[in-house]
Image (cartoon, rainbow, N blue to C red):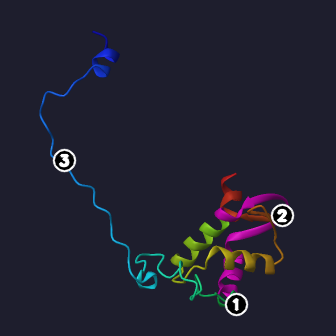
Amino acid sequence: MTQKSKWMDWQPTGQVLEKRVPTVPTKPTNPSSVSFVGTHAGRFSNTEPAEPPHDPAAWAEDVARWMSLRCRFRDNGWLSVHTLHNDFIRWAIENDSVPCQRGVFLALLAAEGCTIERDLVYGLYLIDDEETA
């Protein structure tokens, strides 16, 4: 008997498994009483903003200091925003500061005169990258 026919011709041995009656979950009577609990609480509500707005001015000094210590400008080359933001986060934590969100970081880079296209920053590079190259 081949493997395929073995499984296709299989018959139960007569042992009956316990039959379960499917249960249907009850619907809440008041849809507004449903709440989501977790890290994204409040994001699904139309009455509250998804995240409080952050003022880029609060991080302007930290980003300017990070750029003067960790970055250099050059006329050619692109570097990913992800790489720069991760380096800023590490630097901020090492210097007992609070890192900013990506959107705030992008706004501050643009305010410093950086050209940003498709998640790439033109003309800015990390000093550590220059030393390893």
Q: In this view, does 20 lie above or below 41?
A: above
- Residue under pointer 2: 74
The image shows residue 3 at horizontal and vertical percentages of 31, 15
User: Residue 7: which quarter of the image?
Assistant: top left
Residue segment shown in magenta:
59-83
Crowd rating for badge 2 (residues with CA inside 10 Å; few <14, some 14–19, many 20+): few
Secondary structure that dominates the magenta span: helix
Q: Where is residue 121 in the image (x, y as percent from the top left)?
A: 77, 65
Determine which residue is flagged by label 3. Answer: 19
The residue at the point 45 percent across, 81 percent down is: 31
Q: Which of 86 and 23 is in front in this view?
A: 23
Indicate the quadrant containing the N terminus: top left, top right, bottom left or bottom right: top left
> Height in image: 24 above or below 28?
above
Q: Nearer the viewer, mark 1 or mark 3?
A: 3
What's under tag 3, amino acid-wise?
Answer: Lys
Q: Between marks 1 and 2, how big is the CA–CA gap?
A: 26 Å
Sequence-first disc among 1 and 2? 1
